[in-house]
Amino acid sequence: MTFSIGSTKIQLPKRFLILPIIAWIGYAGNYLNPGNFYVYMLGALLIGSVISAVHHAEVVAHRVGEPLGTLILALSVTVIEAGLIISLMLAGGPDASVYARDTIFAAIMIILTGIVGICLLVGGVKYMEQNFVLSGVNTALVGLTVIIMLSLILPNLTVSEPGPYFNNSQLIFVATVTLVIYLTFVLVQTVRHRDYFLPQDTGDVDNDDHADPPNKTTAWISLVFLLLSLGVVILLGKALSHDIEAAVVHLGAPKTLVGVIIAGIVLLPEGIAAYRAARKDRLQTSLNLAFGSAMASVGLTIPTIAVASLVLELPVTLGIDTKSMVLVVMAIFINMLSLSNGKTNIMQGIVLLVLFATYLFTTIIP
């Protein structure tokens, strides 16, 4: 959708310009304590602002090109995820230290079993089989496996601190190596081996993927609204933190569900984009979005949370329990088996979605 300012065409949907402004107004109105209905409205504005932020990040990324564009998009998603996590941690409470772990683990499970599963199922139903470049998927899974094990499982095995915790030195080390692995992945994806991640030509023309970059004015407007969207997402997350916790407790569900809710909000835009790509027989694009989001969810969020923990003196728990270790190892293993030969069908999609359902069920009824 385009509109004009003077003689300059602005290539942006108006809803993504209006939503952040309404969200800021809604956040300001929260100080009047308007009641429970207003909380639901703020929740809707939070989701809308997340979608707006990711859209504007994609516009800016398309304008600046690779590899900077990929970093801008990943950093934007990380700001949203880390901002919501830190908002909940600052709100305090007995479970504040586990929100980082729960959200990162939820993001990994949603991506590896939910998003990848639905993409494989939808693509398999519509096209029987779909192809992708095996080298790119292997590159992502190698890096993702290491940073998951280091950040979520290793804390259970160290002995410097009792329980599933890192001491400060260990936290700094793990944050550093996860960041190194993520940045190396970005270098491989965008510079050294771009061909590993390029969609295969299926004969279909996807105008979205081959569209010309937006003009400079559009990119600057998107940058401004990206900052506005990110700011209001963090503030709304902080304002709604107690309501999210209260809603989970009211449902009688474990507070682990709070992490699932945060991860679901953050990953909603990327999940929709991956689903649409799979329906267009562009599974490579779907997998790039999924695994790129997973790498950023750990490789950038862990260092960000580590810095916040040390600077703000916030306790952070990273080690997951035995049940979660079994689920995440199964998710990685099934992905490696399902994506081992460059072709997929509905069987892999069904198996991953069953594992996703198992994760959700055992989160609500542990």
Image: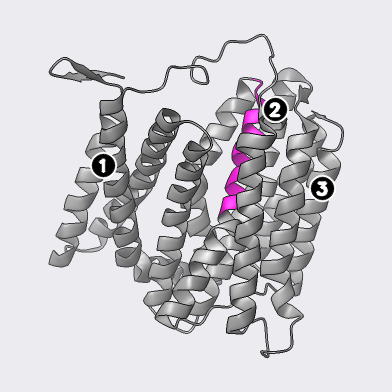
Is residue 208 visible to us here?
yes
* Magenta stretch holds residue 202: no
First in sequence, mark 1 or 2: give its number: 2
Name the residue carrying label 2: 195
Q: Which structural element holds mark 3?
A: helix
Q: Which residue is mark 1?
A: 224
* SS under mark 1: helix
Question: Earlier along the polypeptide chain: callout 1 or callout 3?
Answer: 1
**Where residue 71 sits in the image (x, y, percent)?**
50, 44
Question: 10 Å neighbourhood of mark 2: few (<14), some, or many (≥20)?
Answer: some
| Residue sitting at x 41%, y 22% | 213
- Graded by Cα atoms within 10 Å as few (under 14), some (14 to 19) or many (20 or more), the crowding at tag 1 reads few
> Tag 1: residue type?
Val
- Callout 2, which amino acid? Asp
Q: The magenta stretch spans which residues? A: 281-296
Q: Nearer the viewer, residue 44 or 64?
A: 64
Is 11 left, or right, of 169 in this rendering? left
Q: Is residue 244 above or below residue 89?
A: above
Dot placed on the residue nearer the N-terminal end, 2 or 3:
2
Picture quarter containing residue 302? bottom right
- Quadrant of residue 130 within the rendered picture: top right
Q: Position of residue 179 (x, y in %)?
A: 60, 59
Q: Nearer the viewer, residue 361 or 108?
A: 108
Q: Which residue is mark 3?
A: 334
Q: Residue at x 28, y 59 (%)?
A: 39
Q: Are marks 1 and 2 in contact (CB under 8 Å)?
A: no
Give the alpha-carbon distance from disc 1 to disc 3, as whole Å.
41 Å
The quadrant of the rendering that contains the N terminus is top left
Q: Is residue 314 above or below residue 31?
A: below
Mark in front: 1 vs 3 = 1
Position of 55 with respect to 225 (left or right) is right
